[in-house]
Image (cartoon, rainbow, N blue to C red):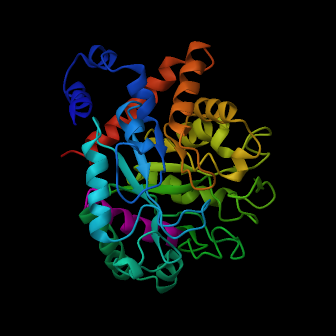
Amino acid sequence: MLSLFLAGEACSQDTSDETAEEEISLDQKIGQMLNVGFRGTAISDTNHIVRDIQHYHLGGVTLFDYDVPLDTALRNIRSPQQLKTLINDLQARAETPLFVAVDQEGGKVARLKPERGFPASVSAQSLGETNNTDSTRYYARRTAETLSELGFNLNFAPVVDLNVNPGNPVIGRLERSFSADPRTVVKHASVYIEAHHNFDIVTVLKHFPGHGSSKKDSHLGVVDVTETWSKQELIPYRRLIHSGQADMIMTAHIFNAEWDTAHPATLSKPVITGMLRDSLGFDGVVISDDLMMGAIRKEYGLKTAIKQALLAGVDILTFANNAIYDPEIVPRAHNIIRELIAGEEVSRQRIDQSYRRIMELKRNRLTP
């Protein structure tokens, strides 16, 4: 199960890093760059996710409680014991430990709900309004402990978007932001992250470079923030990166003509490489928001979206399979990346770069 992971670990302790990495196949590296959703509360060998893990070396999965395409409240999560068994079964099939992710922000965005036997949670907005770090620490610790007991190792949280537009349908109205004040956001996000790290849970800052000022929902289509976005929305990222607390950062499918006149942030090299990596100094893992969301799917073909995300500097491509459902998305994405490399549209070096970042984070946080 852990051979590829441990090979990477040996790499970090050996002067022959490059030689050892050459022993890892291109297929293995590509697989680590994919994170997908799937249907099922239990694993059978006929489920495509088993093929994706074993044949395509899948790097991560995301679990949901609700299946949007089917409009049913049964997807992956039924009860604590069922979920723990599911996660154990997934990891047992992986050669390299999987990132097993969930959106457990708290409040209205919580996949683990009390009616299914999980602890109650509160929203980031509620914590920000209370503005008591002890309260934030208590709820963050309870969330992190629950995730750890179940077998999760990645939480798509905290949201560090500023609540500058309370009417924002995807941030403000859902109470996902701690505050409109970047200092308050940083204070509570820092406590939230620390509590998760105490239980070896990887955290994700989202949605870069700031979704709080938008007026529309990027799940549905293109969101233009050219007239509403401000540089203060970068403050939480800058401070949390500089404090060393940023494990992983998720991109936003938002467009701003002042950043890039052609592409939304997820697909923009000026944003991901220029702004996030060069200006803010982040050299960790960048993960895309779901590439099946309307803002990407309705505007770009799959090959174009994958190519542009990779060229922009994204390390992990997310296909949640919960806007539309495509059981063949992993082989399709995998083959597209191989074609892009064969056609010299994406370099091997770009793949190697992402693979190293991903494996470094896995070694640091997922060590058995």
Q: Nearer the viewer, residue 9 or 188?
A: 9
Q: Which residues are magenta?
A: 183-200
Asked if the magenta segment contains residue 186, the reply would be yes
Tell me which residue sits at (65%, 67%) in the image.
170
Query: In the image, residue 53 lies at what x, y percent?
Result: 37, 38
Residue 1 is covered by the magenta coloring: no
Residue appearing at x 41%, y 27% in the figure = 29
- Residue 43 lies, in percent from the top left, at 34, 51
Identify whether 40 is placed above or below 292. below
Regarding residue 282, the answer to whether it shows in the image is no
Tell me which secondary structure the magenta stretch mostly adopts: helix
> Which one is in front, 326 or 59?
326
Q: Is residue 90 in view from this perspective?
A: yes
Q: Eyeballing the image, is 115 above or below 344?
A: below
Q: Residue at x 70, y 65 (%)?
A: 213
> Is 215 on the left or on the right of 13, as rendered?
right
